[in-house]
Structure formats: C-alpha cells, structure tokens
Image (tube, rainbow, N blue to C red):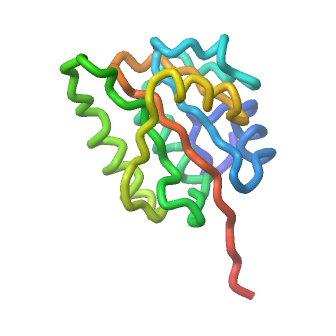
C-alpha cells in the first residue's frame, strides 16, 4: 500500500497512467462496452463503476488544457430516448477534482469505438448505466519554478 493513492487504482493502471503522455487518451468503459475488442491495453476493474474510477483517476491525471473538450462521452444513439443521468455525476466529479472543465464533447457511437481503438488504454468496469463510457485526454503538469 502507498499513501495518498486511491486503492481502487491497480498497479497495472498506475503504470499505464505514468506511461501516458500529453494528448494520450484513456477510456473508462461501462460493462456493456466491447473493451477487449477495442483495447490496445486493457485494464479490468470489475466490480467497480465508472464514477468511482473517474474520481480516483482524476486525483492523479491532469486533463489537457490545450483542448476545449478534454472529456468526451458517447452520444445517445438516434431514436433512443435514454437520458443518461450519470453524465451529471461525471460533471460534478470533474469540477470537484479541480481540473479545468467547460463542457463535454460528444462522439457518435461507432466513431467512439474507433477512437477507443486508438486510445492508449481502456479501463473496463462493471458500470451498469447506459452511455456511461468516457474518454479523458491527458494534459501536462506545470510546476512553477
């Protein structure tokens, strides 16, 4: 165990977060997402939901300040009447993290899948909410010296 690192973050995920560079993307996927098919690197966090993983990741992960929308969601499929209330929870978590955030970007389902295939890694969760997939673009840490 280490101090100040959320225990939901596995050693494998911590290594991946450290290896990621500016502009690399991380997908945190819900339980319905075809994570194994899409992932270059797959981390399984079965038994956990996206909100708790998102909150833990954002304790260590800077969002890209050079991108107006460093956080993207899978848009609701045309004709589906679902209203993903989990997105409100994501917004609260991101704002609480202190990371700069204006609004989400939205990506059509199959474009989202293609983007996930290009992502640095996919974190598979057991999240049961629909349209709960989220992409984070990594930023930089600036130290004042």
Number of marks: 0
Depth check, front residue: 45 or 40: 40
Q: From the viewer's perspective, is residue 8 above or below residue 36?
A: below
**What is the x, y in percent for residue 27?**
58, 33
- At horizontal 44% and vertical 29% (from top left) the residue drawn is 108
Q: From the viewer's perspective, is residue 25 above or below residue 85?
A: below
Q: From the viewer's perspective, is residue 102 above or below residue 1?
A: below
User: What is the quadrant of residue 6 in the picture?
Assistant: top right
Quadrant (top left/top right/bottom left/bottom right) for the C terminus: bottom right
Depth check, front residue: 42 or 46: 42
Quadrant (top left/top right/bottom left/bottom right) for the N terminus: top right
Q: Residue furthest front?
A: 78
**What is the x, y in percent for residue 47?**
48, 16
**What is the x, y in percent for residue 125?**
51, 21
User: What is the quadrant of residue 84 in the picture?
Assistant: top left
**What is the x, y in percent for residue 143?**
70, 77
Depth check, front residue: 109 or 63: 109
Q: Residue furthest bottom?
A: 145
Depth check, front residue: 25 or 115: 115
Is residue 43 shown left or right of residue 34?
A: right
- At horizontal 64% and vertical 59% (from top left) the residue drawn is 139
Q: From the viewer's perspective, is residue 80 above or below residue 142?
A: above
- At horizontal 70% and vertical 46% (from top left) the residue drawn is 24
């Amino acid at each position: 165990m280490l101090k100040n690192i959320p225990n939901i973050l596995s050693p494998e995920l911590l290594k991946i977060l450290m290896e990621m560079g500016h502009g690399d993307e991380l997908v945190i996927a819900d339980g319905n997402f075809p994570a194994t098919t899409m992932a270059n690197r797959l981390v399984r966090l079965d038994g956990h939901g996206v909100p708790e993983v998102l909150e833990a990741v954002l304790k260590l992960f800077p969002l890209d300040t050079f991108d107006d929308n460093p956080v993207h969601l899978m848009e609701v499929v045309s004709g589906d009447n679902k209203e993903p209330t989990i997105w409100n929870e994501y917004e609260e978590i991101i704002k609480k993290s202190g990371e700069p955030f204006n609004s989400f970007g939205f990506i059509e389902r199959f474009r989202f899948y293609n983007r996930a295939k290009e992502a640095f890694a996919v974190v598979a969760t057991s999240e049961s909410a629909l349209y709960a997939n989220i992409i984070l673009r990594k930023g930089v840490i600036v130290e004042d010296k």
